[in-house]
Image (tube, rainbow, N blue to C red):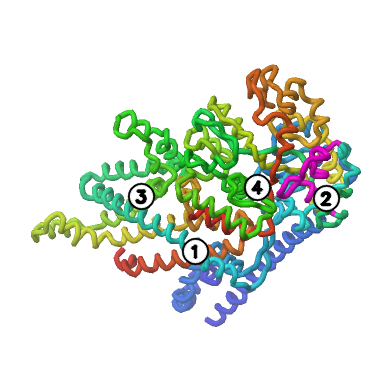
Amino acid sequence: MTDTRTPSRSATPSTGVSRRTLLKGTAAVAGAAVGSGAITGFPTIWAQNIKNVTLRQFGTGVSNLNAVADKVKEDLGFTLQMTALDSDAVTQRAVTQPKSYDIADIEYWIGKKVFPAGVMQPMDVKKIKNFDKIVPIFITGKLTPDSAIAQGTAPHTVGFVEGKDSTKFAKAPTDWMTLIPTIYNADTLGIRPDLVGRPISSWKDLLDPAFKGKASLLNIPSIGIMDAAMVCEAMGEVKYGDKGNMTKEEIDKTLKIMTDAKKAGQFRAFWKTFDESVNLMSSGEVIIQSMWSPAVAAVRAKGIQCVYQPLKEGYRAWGGGLGIAKHLSGLELDAAYEYINWYLSGWVGAYLNRQGYYSAVLETAKQHMSPEEWAFWMEGQPAKADILSPEGKVMEKAGAVRDGGSFQERMGRVACWNAVMDEDRYMVRKWNEFIAA
Amino acid sequence: MTLTAETSRPSATAAAGRARRVRLLPRVAPYLQAAPLTVTLLLFLLVPILTIVAVSFWDYDSVRIYPDFVLTNYTELLTSPVTWKTYLNTLKYAALTWAITLGIGFTVAYFLAFHVRSTTWQMVLFLVCTIPFWTSNIIRMISWIPFLGRNGLLNSGLISAGIIDQPLEFLLFSDFSVVLAFVHLYALFMVVPIFNSMMRIDRALIEAARDGGASAAQTLWNVILPLTKPGIAIGSIFVVTLVMGDFITVRLMSGGQSASIGLMIANEISLLQYPAAAANAVVLLAVVLIMVVAMLRVVDIRKEL
């Protein structure tokens, strides 16, 4: 009996060992494969044709347009992969998965969070052909030499770093730019002129008791707090040192006013996504709310009246730009520069201007737009012909005038930029209290 | 492996093999049988939860998290009045949803089990109950919005019928709409286990109750209800845990105006405050576990199944 058992005993471990050895072998091979991938990163084969390059770009939906990717393929030959996410997810991914993208299309206030994490590399302005033609807001902060610098995370304050390997933002322009501006706009309140029943001229109208249960605010803390601050300042209830960098006391006061309004039933809803704001407005649930310009266009496209109302206190502005991931080098880095230069060369600029945004280099964009389009979008003149969207649909009939007027009138009256505050964490906590109240 | 080798042995050594098997099999077999589930649970349940617990003690700033051992995440969470208010609000939703789904679930199951006589019809009607579940949760939820809105179907219907002259504002973006959506989404989770329990009740017991002179109400209260308890307990566990963990229903149906714990966690994640979110998740897990244990103390599912 012992005899019969012994071989089976010895046989069993031996098969076990052999299987384990096999497993070990497989694991080693797999490990080696993974390891080698991690070590070499992206192959920098100089002989390779630029057409084989694929750049992965991610960012917020506004400028991640498939039309741009198609045009890049056509004009430059390489492939641009685009991923659109919301701004919170963009921040998260930019910091936590720096290898998952080559080009980040982010807003300046996101850049203020992301750049210090050391996941991106600044760009050499000498390689940017149209650098001198970029709208001065992004370089000096002033649209015209005598205009005032707006509050908040103004793009020029986070637009440059001190050197090639620095993550410290420079006080004055240097040769190393963090983000190349792509798209920006001035935001204000959207209203339903058919339902509000009176002219709207100030941010404080958002809390007018006449609109009880018919107002809405966007629930993205870093942007919502700005709209709230514009309202409180217009009411004369709170005086701010810098709306884009509030003190704890200012945050408390602002959200106290908003909480009281919420408890009194002023708000119908808070929205977080573009389509929510469109639906609230077009269904008539809300008649005055924070809004983004394409959302206004979307409501109008349904045949419903909606105005992007200019207000006397000025606009809350935002801006985005393209940044290059730290891991990019060699041919891919060259491709990235080429892409950025192409971005500023006019075609995209015209495309963005036609959507109601603004582009960074106006001179080149103008060459790609018809005189009628330019007059309508940029000069605030009545449309001489029907104004078409980039997809060719009629956006505005002849004779229409852009809400807020010309580029100078709109961007010249920016009161505050979207921002990250030093008291960010405190503000978010208080904002969540306001939403839960 | 040893066992497979043994069993495949030729019959000459069968006696020897059997002798060993008698000693080994009872000891090893249960472990082997339990192994796949154990490994799965370890990998996909225990490891993630332990990770969450570990991260809940880490420190963080606006962009990064740092391995550490700090209690600030918990102190900030537990000392904030918002947390308490949010928990209270979520518990309110859970209680309301539970009570209403229980009422509906019990009634529907009772009707199916005791009023519908033919098994075919029972099955047909039961399947009818599941029809709304053929579309996604979100679709079922969102479809309430145009129905309940200020200019929605219900309001315009009531106004044109002359019943009201102002649209009813409380219908949408309110606690009412949140609970309505919850009930709509989760009623079936109550119907199914209760129906199942009721189908297992021996009909002779009901006849006996009737023969003993019990009224219909007495039979329901003293015979059917106690025997349905395991079903009610299982349904309650489903509904309560689903509501406690929800975030999207509350956000969409309250128009972003109400908070729930799930929503709080989602907000923290979106702001990269992973350690705070982890601490919140740990507390939520503890609360839900306590609730489930409490329910199981009232009804011993295993005994009564």
Rendered image: mark on residue A98: none
Q: Nearer the viewer, residue B160 or A52?
A: B160
Res. A97 visible in picture: yes
Provide the secondary structure element on which disc 2 rests: loop
Q: Residue at x 31, y 66 (%)?
A: B299
Identify which amino acid the numbered label 2 is placed on: Phe
Looking at the rendered structure, whether the residues under marks 1 and 2 are on a common chain is answered as no
Q: CA distance from mark 3 to mark 2?
A: 57 Å
**Of marks 1 and 4, the one in the foreground:** 1
> Does A287 sit left or right of B92 as displayed?
right
Rendered image: mark on residue B81: 1
**Of marks 3 and 4, the one in the foreground:** 4
Q: What subunit carries mark 4?
A: A
**Of marks 4 and 2, the one in the foreground:** 2
Magenta extent: A133-161
Rendered image: mark on residue A87: 4
- The percent position of residue B82, horizontal first and vertical second, equals 50, 61
Provide the secondary structure element on which disc 4 rests: helix
- The percent position of residue B95, horizontal first and vertical second, equals 36, 58
> On the image, numbered disc 2 is attached to which residue?
A160
| For residue A313, above or below residue A381 | below
Q: What subunit carries mark 1?
A: B
Q: Is residue B176 magenta?
A: no
| For residue B19, above or below residue A26 | below
Identify which amino acid the numbered label 4 is placed on: Ser
- The percent position of residue A49, horizontal first and vertical second, equals 86, 39
Count neighbours of disc 2 (C-alpha within 10 A) and say few if under 14, some if 14 to 19, many if 20 or more: many
Q: Nearer the viewer, residue A67 or A203?
A: A203
Looking at the rendered structure, whether the residues under marks 1 and 3 are on a common chain is answered as yes
> On the image, numbered disc 3 is attached to which residue?
B187
